[in-house]
Structures are given as structure tokens and as C-alpha cells.
Image: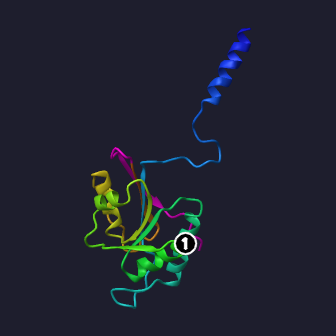
């Protein structure tokens, strides 16, 4: 009789589980996620607003693979050829437009207000993407990327209550 009562109790508890089942998406309601990505390799023979090199175009395509199974709500880019060209393949793959932001006047807290609860991929520059991550964390942990560093990006999450975490990641999925 005790075994039967234990079995009934376990079955009752398991039927009350309201969490997602395996394979179902997890609801991250209230979580804002940012991927701060530097533009890909740029040409050095085109002045202050160059296009991407062939290697840069490959890197831009590699982002499509990285985000293949990830939810993306917005793709935004500074208004430079190299950042727009880096964002374009991902936007096309997700059937989205690239939203343009003003790199000189946009603050991380403005981005957080505008995109609260969304997943955003922002394509920017070596000396700006670290600042967005730092500002969201109210810290100054991350320095600007080196001029030749195209492999690193920043990932930041902010809860509805304002708790945040950021991390510097490496693009280890780039094919040569």
C-alpha cells in the first residue's frame, strides 16, 4: 500500500511540472540578450568607409551559421559599409532588415530601453562594442579590441530586474 501511495504521489508531482519539455524552447521572457560583434575584416585601400575583404565576407557568412538555431529579434548595424556588409548575410538568412544606429550617439542603456526582452545582434566597431558591454554591467572590465582582432565579440544578458552579465567570447567557428 505504501508503494502504491508513493507511486501516485510521484505521478501527481510529475504531471504538475510546468517547465519546458525536451526540445521545446525555453521562455526567456524579460531577459534581454545582446551580441556585440565587430565588423569583419575591412579593405585598407578604400579610405575611411571601406568594404569587406574576401576574408571579411567569409566571416560575415560564418555568423549565419553561428545564429542558425538561435532566436534573433533585431539585427542592427552602424552606418558604415563594413558593418552593414557584415550584418547583411545574417539579416538575409533571418528575412529581416538591418536597423541602423548612430554609433556616435547611442548608449547601451538606450539600446536596453528600446530592445527590452529581445535578442539583438549589433554589428559595431573594435572601440565601441566593449563599451556597450561595460555600460550594461556598470563596469569597465573589457578593453577595446586590438585593431587586428576580428575573432572576439561580446555577449551580454540583462534580466528584467536589471541584473546583468557579460562575457568576451571567441569566434572559434570560423573556417579557413
- Give the side of residue 156 with respect to residue 6, left or right: left
Within 10 Å of disc 1 (Cα), the crowding (few <14, some 14-19, many 20+) is: few
174 is higher (above) or lower (below) than 34:
below
Q: How many numbered marks are there? A: 1
Task: Give me the residue at 32% from left, 66% from top.
Answer: 144
Task: Give me the residue at 52% from left, 47% from top.
Answer: 27
Q: Does the magenta stretch include residue 167?
A: yes
- Give the side of residue 107 with respect to residue 153, left or right: left
**Residue 165 location in percent, x, y?**
38, 49
Q: Does residue 50 appear in the picture of this structure?
A: yes
Q: Could you say which is closer to the camera, residue 93 or residue 138?
A: 93
The range drawn in magenta is 159-176
**Residue 104 location in percent, x, y?**
26, 73
Task: Give me the residue at 51% from left, 64% from top.
Answer: 171
Q: Could you say which is closer to the camera, residue 143 or residue 93?
A: 93
Quarter of the image with the N terminus in it: top right
99 is higher (above) or lower (below) than 13:
below
The colour style of the image is: rainbow
Residue 80: which quarter of the image? bottom left
99 is higher (above) or lower (below) than 166:
below
Q: Does residue 142 appear in the picture of this structure?
A: no
**Residue 143 location in percent, x, y?**
31, 62
Which type of secondary structure does the marked residue at label 1 adopt? loop
Q: Could you say which is closer to the camera, residue 110 or residue 132?
A: 110
Query: Which residue lies under the disc numbered 1?
Result: 95
Q: Main secondary structure of the magenta part?
A: loop
Q: Could you say which is closer to the camera, residue 153 or residue 93?
A: 93
Task: Give me the residue at 44% from left, 71% from top.
Answer: 150
Residue 127: which quarter of the image? bottom left
Amino acid at each position: 500500500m505504501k508503494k502504491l501511495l508513493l507511486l501516485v504521489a510521484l505521478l501527481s508531482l510529475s504531471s504538475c511540472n510546468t517547465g519546458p519539455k525536451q526540445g521545446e524552447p525555453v521562455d526567456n521572457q524579460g531577459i534581454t540578450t545582446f551580441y556585440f560583434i565587430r565588423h569583419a575584416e575591412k579593405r585598407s585601400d578604400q579610405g575611411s568607409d571601406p568594404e569587406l575583404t574576401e576574408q571579411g565576407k567569409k566571416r560575415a557568412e560564418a555568423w549565419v551559421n553561428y545564429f542558425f538555431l538561435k532566436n534573433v529579434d533585431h539585427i542592427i548595424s552602424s552606418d558604415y559599409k563594413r558593418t552593414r556588409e557584415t550584418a547583411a548575410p545574417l539579416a538575409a538568412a533571418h528575412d529581416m532588415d538591418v536597423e541602423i544606429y548612430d554609433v556616435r550617439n547611442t548608449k547601451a542603456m538606450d539600446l536596453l530601453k528600446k530592445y527590452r526582452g529581445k535578442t539583438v545582434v549589433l554589428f559595431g566597431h573594435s572601440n565601441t562594442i566593449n563599451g556597450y558591454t561595460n555600460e550594461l554591467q556598470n563596469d569597465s572590465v573589457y578593453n577595446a579590441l586590438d585593431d587586428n582582432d576580428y575573432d572576439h565579440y561580446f555577449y551580454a544578458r540583462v534580466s528584467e530586474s536589471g541584473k546583468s552579465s557579460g562575457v568576451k567570447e571567441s569566434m572559434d567557428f570560423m573556417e579557413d
